[in-house]
Image: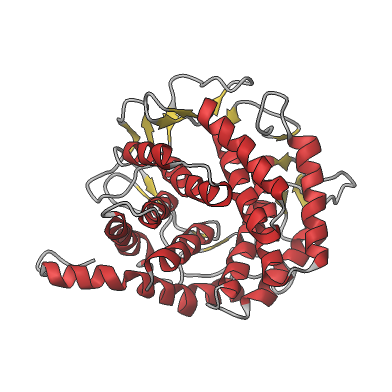
Amino acid sequence: MADAGSTAGETRTHLHGIVETLKSQIVTYALPLWSSEGWDFRAGGFIEKLDAVGRADADAPRRVRVQARQIYCFAKAAQLGWYPQGAEIARKGLDYMLAKAKAPDGKPGFVHILAPDGSVLNPLRDTYDHAFVLLALATVYQMDRDAKVRAEIDELMQFIDTQLRSPDGGYLEGVPASMPRRQNPQMHLLEAFIAAFDATHDQAFQARAGDLFGLFSSNLFDAKKGVLGEYFEQDWSRIEPVSVEPGHQAEWVWLLKGFERITGCPTGKQRAALLESALRYRDATGCLVDEGDAQGNIVKATRRCWPQTEIIKAFVAQAESGVQGAAEEARAALTRLDKYYLQHPVKGGWYDQFDGEGRSLVDAIPASSFYHILCAVAEAERVLGA
């Protein structure tokens, strides 16, 4: 971002180059880093995190959702032509995930956490995890329409439809089921269903997405207060006091645009309300904080990296819909992401979270953030250009 002495013209010039700048950082540094130091060449699988100087934490347990997110990143980068070798890395990651995490105990579904040696640390079948497994499979399938990958999608959907569906609407937290119910797994299943429809053109994914849009409209989003709830009772009544994560509100803006694209169902009113509400929860840097309340007050002044990527995607979605000023807001948000989070001593790394005073709270570089960063920049390039 330009310093205080820069002219408005210089600032605008930088804003208009920010998409290409961040794409270049991803292609030149992040993808090579996470395919080398971020891959376990001894035991297989993606590393969960790097330390502050960019060395692999080979002893950290491995969440299956992170394996899936990294598969998505490399498949997406290959699909976009950013990193052709990403196709092979994505397939290698998928082979590992299928070999180690899929039904190792003879029960259907994917386990929750693996040890570095590939053994099971937690056998929970977590719905949030399965959303990312589906996203990974859909993105790999979109590369070359491999029939074996399509078969994996179908098998996974059999599990999701029969074991995770809830009689009260939406999907359970996992197997075994737990409380409270959260909007987050529902949101990521919507993301995965949209991606699966794009990859397969199977209208069953449209229908599943439509069910979740209905849940969003009737229970998850309080249109009167303009807030998205996070935690719910079994019947999807909101747990009070309502916790608001502005990053999720922004994420839904982008997802609702995707839902509109694949179904033709208009979502502009809900998107505008969500975005307006999310923007209440910003600090002096202009970044989204981690949590607020239903009245628009900041509850947690810490700020993670991922909400900043989601506000980028929200503005990109609005720009794609022709909303005036949204493109410049997206570029400004990209510039904040670069200034506060991506200027890490490890090239291709990032800061994960800051406190209210701007001090970094996390020493490690988590692999889980790559999915957010790459997706935000890819969407910005698609809609805004370089």
Residue at the extreme front: 264
Q: Is residue 338 left or right of residue 195?
A: left
Q: Is residue 38 left or right of residue 101?
A: left
Residue 204 vertical position relative to residue 291 in the rendered view, above or below: below
Q: How is the image coloured?
A: secondary structure
Residue 43, position as x, y percentages in the image: 75, 68
Q: Count the labels in the image.
A: 0
Residue 381 in view of the camera: yes
Residue 334, position as x, y percentages in the image: 34, 61
Q: Is residue 109 left or right of residue 82?
A: right
Choose between 272 and 192: the one closer to the eye.
Answer: 272
Residue 297, position as x, y percentages in the image: 30, 30
Residue 45 in view of the camera: no
Quadrant in the rendering for residue 320: bottom left
Q: Is residue 68 left or right of residue 258?
A: right
Q: Quadrant of the C terminus?
A: bottom left
Quadrant in the rendering for residue 34: bottom right
Residue 355 vertical position relative to residue 339 in the rendered view, above or below: above
Residue 312 vertical position relative to residue 212 in the rendered view, above or below: below
Residue at the extreme right: 106
Task: Give the residue displayed 58% in from the left and 30% down from the top.
Answer: 215
Residue 214, position as x, y percentages in the image: 58, 32
Choose between 197 and 166: the one closer to the eye.
Answer: 197
Task: Give the residue displayed 42% in from the left and 68% down from the top.
Answer: 381
Q: Quadrant of the N terminus?
A: bottom left
Choose between 367 and 94: the one closer to the eye.
Answer: 94
